[in-house]
Amino acid sequence: MTTPSLGEVSRHGLWSNNPALVQLLGLCPLLAVSSSVVNALGLALATLLVLLGSNVAVSLIRHQVSGTLRLPAFVMIIAAFVTCAELLMAAYTFELYRILGIFIPLIVTNCAILGRAEAFASRQPLLPSATDGLMTGLGFGAVLVLLGGLRELFGQGTLFVDMDLLLGPAAAGWGITVFPDLDFLFLVLPPGAFFATGLLIALKNLIDDRLERRRQARLPDRPRETRRVRVTGTIR
Amino acid sequence: MNAELPRAMGRAALGLATFALITAGSVALTRDLTAERIADNRQASRHREVAAVAPAGHDDRLLDHVLSRPAAPMFGFEAPITLWQARAGERVLGVVVPVTARQGYSGDIAMVVGLDTAGTITGVRVTDHRETPGLGDRIEARKGDWIEQFTGHSLTSPPAGGWAVGQDGGGIDALTGATITSRAVVAAVHRTLEWFETQPGSLLAPPATGETP
Amino acid sequence: MAERFDFPGGITPPTRKARATRSPLCTPPLPRRVILPLAQHAGAPAEPCVEVGQRVRTGERIARASGLISAALHASITGRVAAIEDHPLPTADGRRGPCIVIEGEGEDDWLTLPPLDWRQAAETTLLERLDASGVVGLGGAAFPTQVKARIRELHAIDTVIVNAAECEPYISADDLTLRHFAADVLEGARLMARLAGAERILVGIEDDKPEARQALEVAREATLAEAVPVEIRAIATRYPSGGERQLIKRLLGREVPSGGLPADVGTHCHNPGTLRAALAAIRDGVPLVERVVTLTGEALARPGNVVARLGTPMGELLGFAGLDTQALHRLVMGGPMMGEALGELACPVVKATNCLIAATRSELPDPPPEQPCIRCGACEEACPASLLPQQLYWFARGREHDKAERFHLFDCIECGACSYVCPSHIPLEQYYRAAKQTIRAQRREAARADHARHRFEFRQARLAREQAEKEARRAARKRAAAPATRPPAGSDAQSAAPAADLRGLRIAHSAARAAERKAEKALARAAESGEADPATLEDLETQLATARENRQAAEARLQAARDVEEKPS
Amino acid sequence: MLETLFDADLVTAVLALVGLAAAFGALLGFAGERFRVEGNPVVEKIDALLPQTQCGQCGYPGCRPYAEAIGEGEDINKCPPGGETTIAALADLLGREVKPLDGEAEATPRVAFIREEECIGCTKCIQACPVDAILGTARRMHTVIADECTGCDLCLEPCPVDCIEMLPRDTGRDAAPLPPGPGHRPVLPTPAWRTALIASDRPSSSTEARHG
Amino acid sequence: MSLMHTDQTAPRRPASTTAVMGWLLVATLPGIAALTWHFGWGVLTNLGFAAAAAIGLEATMLRLRHRPVAATLGDNSALVTAVLLGAALPPGSAWWLILIGMVAAIVVAKHLYGGLGHNLFNPAMVGYALLLVSFPGPMSLWPSPDGLLSPEARPLGEALHQLAGLTSLETRDALSGATPLDAFKHKPEALMASEFWADSPLPDGALAAWQQVALAWLAGGALLVYKRVIGWQIPVAMLGTLTLVATLLYAGNPSHQGSPLFHLLGGAAIFGAFFIATDPVSAATSRRGKLIYGAGIGALVMVIRPAGAYPDAVAFAVLLMNFAAPFIDYYSEPRVYGHPTATRGIRVDVDKEAR
Amino acid sequence: MTDFFLILVGTALVNNFVLVQFLGLCPFMGVSSKLESAMGMSLATTFVLTLSSVASHLVYHLLLAPLGLEYLRTIAFILVIAVVVQFTEMVVRKASPLLHQVLGIFLPLITTNCAVLGVALLTLNRGSSVIEAALYGFGAAVGFSLVLVLFAALREHLATADVPTPFRGAAIAMITASLMSLAFMGFSGLVRL
Ligand SMILES: Cc1cc2nc3c(=O)[nH]c(=O)nc-3n(C[C@H](O)[C@H](O)[C@H](O)COP(=O)(O)O)c2cc1C
Ligand SMILES: Cc1cc2nc3c(=O)[nH]c(=O)nc-3n(C[C@H](O)[C@H](O)[C@H](O)COP(=O)(O)O)c2cc1C
Ligand SMILES: Cc1cc2nc3c(=O)[nH]c(=O)nc-3n(C[C@H](O)[C@H](O)[C@H](O)COP(=O)(O)O)c2cc1C
Ligand SMILES: Cc1cc2nc3c(=O)[nH]c(=O)nc-3n(C[C@H](O)[C@H](O)[C@H](O)CO)c2cc1C
Ligand code: SF4
Ligand code: SF4
Ligand code: SF4
Ligand code: SF4
Ligand code: FES
């Protein structure tokens, strides 16, 4: 596996191989914690940190672990990061810790994290791995927050409510009520989470499609040539 | 191959153990460093909850005045009860009782109920629940003032039979679309009041006779 | 009518047979020119055995059967071979194909074969005669009767069934054949019963043909003394009772296994026209040059059944029946359910042409546009094979061929009952036909790929063997050149490696030998069973050759290693 | 700091987990040794799905090496002779996403044809053919066994006199198209007798797709 | 190919999809009439607005998807969805409620899946369930069955007001009530069934009205079966299972459970059995599959009704079985001619390995 | 007995892990495009889930709790799970290579199937016995398998549908899951946990 450029890594993590919209990994926290912006943002930050840390750590030890032990070793690293994060959150942002509840330990099993560790960090040097962790985390977080905003706005008619839990008292007044009296439970409940995610994926497809079409239009008509290796003879 | 087996096992055991050493070590270290702060946070948070429902005028040392009472399954207390006295100096103003409402819509609902000496409710707060966002979660004080309606009520007001949600013929409004949750909360508060009746005086005894922490 | 056995589903479309059954069978004037496609039967096309310009007599063989399943072709008029060239064939896709065109002389000069007595002649003689006469099934599939009649070689048959159901609307060719030649048909059936070794003959006839049934009864009464008993059973009119599988189920309660033949359940099914043609070929020595064709449809002034010479251009035949070209909207060969809509009047009548419908627009209107399937299940109720047509439709449309097969696509008899009832007017069986053809093509390609891989492996093995042999020779030469020289000091390390190698090589050699034996056995088994087709056998041979090459390569390598081994000692 | 490090709590924690991990590690080591698998049987199945043209357009010397590469994680869309069908089949087998073909699909299957009058009998093509589909010996004219030829065109390049060309292969009548689908009328032949009669009388709508 | 088509002869069965849907619409007339008779003009305002919304949405979606608009609209299927959803909603619903329901039904459940014939879930029930989950309040308020002509009956004008969202049922609390199933479900646990009926919180004549409506649906359903628009399998299996389970429950605890007749006629069971569960697109396809499918719906209704949070469970039961239908299809193929036994299920990879 | 039954129904249907609790979604979306693989995945997950539920329970109550190391539970559980999965993987790889290939990356990803850790943690919170823990794990797995298999059949059906282009693939699968989840709302309130 060759080492991709950092730009490429970033593009992958943020858009073209976005964990939430393309790889469909890390869906559980994505759907479960996206009922409001504040929850989403909290989990996004926690996930980002863990992802970054685990990618770095896995990349550092990638030459030391053998086949059978790889998986247990990686998850233990991730679990350690998560537990530390949990403890630190409990120590420093206690309210948020209480709200995110069970989902913090579950960051451990956010498939996206192990997925990146397995697919990327375990084969790449430190810098790309760190970039990948950061960008994937950002990509995931962006979708998470977007989804949170969507569901909060159209489900409850508000936005940025309770941001003070995360950002301190300064953010106490951020909450705005956009549609008073709106209570569209569908979006608040599980079905709405799936639905909104489906719409986001479709939206991404639509954008990709448009971009691709525009790119195609700009390209001159160049017949694709077929590559050939002319190899015959004995194959052993 | 058979000769290989113990070697492979040993290698794997050693490898995994090393990882355990590193990870468990770092976690344990973090924990050591944060344990105190977390405990403080817990305490502070609990205090805020308790203070919110305690009778006015207390000395802000609510969590220091702990009482214990045996379990009372009849009233929904399945484990021994640990409650707090609200005091102003030596004077006992009332108590704050941690109550669990069973049969919520999705699981138990943890609450604290504040009572003054007369058995009048000084406040109810939900401290932990898993009710549906948008429906049942309006029992949270942050999400609505439904929970405030209990303040000022006592066992006799509303009178007998009135301690139920409107749908069941009682005098307490249920949250629209969340009758089950409402029913559970109302029932738990009601039982707490009944239990309070059965503990004449002892809960309100002045500090000298009351248990100390 | 309560019947003992029945098949599920089926439909009862309006029969519309009356117009063509009012008048008796008649013979139109001889065509001036006939066009005889080389491929008008199931199997390989016939091979022309006449030259352009050659004069041929009616009944003279002009093309011979080529291959196991094929049929001969005979001149249907007297005249000169004008051309052997491509002409439009009577198919829906308007394909063209090679045909022999005969320009007539206006007279009918027959060349017949000597008559045979089917009760006396040897079976092989009878089969040869059927072969020489180009008799094929006239019920639709045009399968060479001679091949079908060899049934006895592989299967035990107890019943010969005469398929006189004629369940499709419009068609009355069998009806008229029976009205006029019931005795011949029954005798033909006896002939087939003899060839198949059957002990009874069962005639299945739908109850909308009382005259034909009457004629059959009369013919049966006349031959009561014969050894093989004949039973005539009327069945309620329902499409597709004439499908042989459905008929067998309905008459006998037996089900032809999926992918099998009626012979697998001891039956042998023939169309009345086929039986009459077979009898004519043997008793009178007349090859198959004409057949009964129903000419019907509202665009015809004089509908009826005619005995038409094969190769007659359809336009000519229809003209005889009073075709109004202005009113003609659709020309259909066969019945309206399974027949094919043709685009040209110039197509010739072929052996499988049992009916020509010259329909007006109001009679057979254009199919309405297809609507989405709503899974209403009407098709399922109509399917005589108990398939789930709507599922097959979805899979065929989605090109999910493995699932279509899983839902038994290949058990569909393409009867079209499902399309008939579909409220969304989906031409379902067209989808099935397309899917089947695609699957067959894919299977062929897969077999090709397999074969190519085996050949490739063979080549690899051969190259490896050549390489190994070359090395072995080199090793031998080396040893011969320097027999006495002691190996230099470093040779210990060298000789240790071959020793380990040698064991590996020996194992490889015995594995290669085992593989060879396995391939030999597989080939022998396939060859013995007699069921494998030549391609499979060839493939197995390739595999065996590969195994041989591998074994030889292993041997050579082993030998070379041994040579190296022995050298120091 | 030091006393924190040697805190009893900490030591038990670490010891407990280390013990657990060691036990599990041993279990895994055992399983890893016991259930060791050699090779990859799936390669056989992948290979069976490839068209066996052995043309090398996938970038591997033949189908089998490509099959092995797929087993290792190579993309499944690199075989032009196989085209969409093969990609779909591979995706199905391996549970991967279908991807568009990387390269130019071949329009129709082809076979090599040697113009025998031009052939000088150099045997170069024989050596190039991966399936031994060319017959002939040195200095005699060569010919292709059409049934065996996979159409890989590997024999084209080595021929010094360019006497080999690729011709479309007869694949039989297998191109029955699916009907046009909902919203359209099934395709029936245009009745030629009508067009022949009066051009203007042609039923224009009978075979055309009908929209809206 | 088959060049003949049913229009010429079929005994009773409608000859085109348009006609199938048309007959379905005709068959809803008795039910709609009964509903209107008992619950007032609100039924008709529901239906009218739903139909308009359905046609508008269908046309929009067809245009967006570049499909022939006029030809496809003519198949009446959107109208069927609208009528069925409109009849299921509480009479006199506000326009926005109906619109959201129709968007869920036509846009999400139908056209995102590719339009008529492709949807996996019953569109009308998707719309209904979504509304039920999202707006439990408005969805459980039924007007009292005063009858169209009685003095208390609300005039058409008021129904239009409600449709416009200007007045809601809630503001006329005195006149509105729960459905019988809803009321029965929410009776205090201590109360016996008999006591409940003796002193029912329901408006007068509510139960009778519901039963009459159910019988009217039954009449329409009979027409559907007679015209062979639907097979008998699904309704019979569903109602049979429902009755069976209800009888068992009732026999086990007659003092607290509703009687089988109550379950059969007190809610939407009949309507569901003949008009909803039979939606051919989202149901199981084979005859045996339909039996399983129908039985599943019946059983689920009787699981959810007494124990679940929603009083009338038909919508959810139908959706749940829609969800299971493709799987049922895999396991209910009939025995095909020439095969010794029926093939059931899928071939798990063993076969493929052998291939 | 009824308790056990309630646990099963409760975990399998009412609080269905996938559709209601949002656990195990990645394999749910990832391995559901073919019925065959879905069945394989169901089996594997059922096995792993039940086993690891019990093992976690034991580790917690026999090792962590006595030593006062509750805070290490995440690490310990995930270790248990990873080992169980790894072990299963090796066995499957040996026993059915094709299944192994089909499940591909998903078998190791059972480790990160949140459902597995979720069950372990949720059983802890409920303070159940070993048998209950096993039942809870099994019920969750049955619920997971049920929806996975039904969903796979649904998606196979969907493969022939004429879905608008931007919605093809994951998007329509998500929306289907949404409607399934909507249908499962019907079970809400059936059993209170
Ligand atoms: C997804 C969902 C979540 C629900 N959550 C709650 C809840 O948290 N609390 C509650 O009391 N009712 C909840 N309900 C509603 C109950 O099922 C039931 O409909 C309601 O309690 C009846 O009350 P009502 O008579 O006020 O409408 C929920 C319903 C659904 C569909
Ligand atoms: C030994 C034997 C082999 C046959 N093989 C075939 C065959 O390969 N293909 C075929 O279409 N019919 C074959 N037939 C004839 C069928 O039984 C059947 O009569 C014929 O296909 C026409 O039937 P249909 O018009 O219902 O399609 C064979 C018959 C016999 C006796
Ligand atoms: C749907 C269907 C209907 C058929 N109807 C008839 C029929 O009415 N009469 C008939 O002789 N053959 C009919 N056949 C053909 C028979 O299956 C069978 O091929 C024929 O009887 C064999 O006899 P043959 O070889 O003499 O043609 C039908 C086939 C199918 C598939
Ligand atoms: C017997 C029958 C029942 C139907 N039931 C429904 C239904 O319950 N809901 C619905 O949206 N459409 C129903 N339809 C209409 C149609 O099937 C529906 O629009 C498709 O599901 C949309 O693809 C029904 C159609 C028929 C023929
Ligand atoms: S009859 Fe037509 S519409 Fe009905 S299920 Fe069959 S194919 Fe679909
Ligand atoms: S064409 Fe095939 S699927 Fe249709 S009814 Fe006939 S046998 Fe059944
Ligand atoms: S491109 Fe395809 S056919 Fe050619 S060698 Fe590669 S796999 Fe084989
Ligand atoms: S003959 Fe030529 S094209 Fe054909 S297989 Fe051999 S090398 Fe390839
Ligand atoms: S995040 Fe839960 S399974 Fe992937």
Image (tube, grey):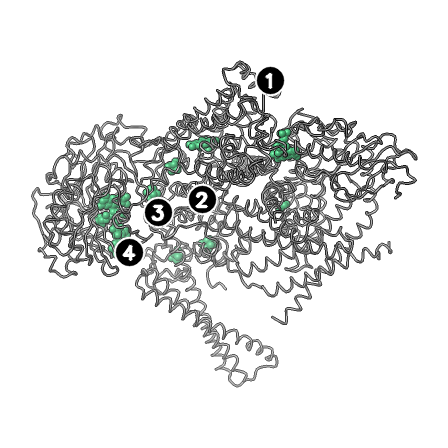
Circle 1 chain: E
Could you say whether the residue bearing mark 2 is in a helix, strand or loop? helix
> In front: mark 1 or mark 4?
1
Residue C44 — which label?
A: none
Tell me the CA gap for discs 1 and 2: 47 Å
Queried on whether the Cβ of the residue with tag 3 lies below 8 angstroms from ligand 6, the answer reads no
Q: Quadrant of the N terminus of chain C?
A: top left
Mark 3 or mark 1: which is in front?
1
Residue for badge 1: E167
Q: Amino acid at mark 1?
A: Thr
Q: Residues within 10 Å of mark 4 (few under 14, many from 20)?
A: some
Classify mark 3: residues with Cα within 10 Å, few (<14), some (14-19) or many (20+). some
Q: Could you tell me if the residues under marks 3 and 4 are in contact, i.e. CB atoms within 8 Å?
A: no
Residue at horizontal 45 percent and vertical 31 percent from the top: E275
| Marks 1 and 4 belong to one chain | no
On the image, the x and y values in percent for residue A212 come to: 54, 37
Q: Residue E329 — which label?
A: 2
Residue A130 located left or right of residue D65? right
* Quadrant of the snapshot with the C terminus of chain C: bottom right
| Amino acid type assigned to the residue bearing label 3 in the image | Gln
What crowding class fits label 1: few (fewer than 14 Cα within 10 Å), some (14-19), or many (20 or more)? some
Q: Residue furthest bottom?
A: C484
Look at label 4 and name its amino acid: Asp
Mark found first going from the N terminus, 1 or 2: 1
C-alpha gap between disc 3 and disc 4: 25 Å
SS label for mark 4: helix
Q: Do the dots labelled 4 and 2 sit on one chain?
A: no
The residue beneath circle 3 is: C437
Q: Is residue A77 left or right of residue C503?
A: right
- Asked if badges 3 and 1 are on one and the same chain, I answer no
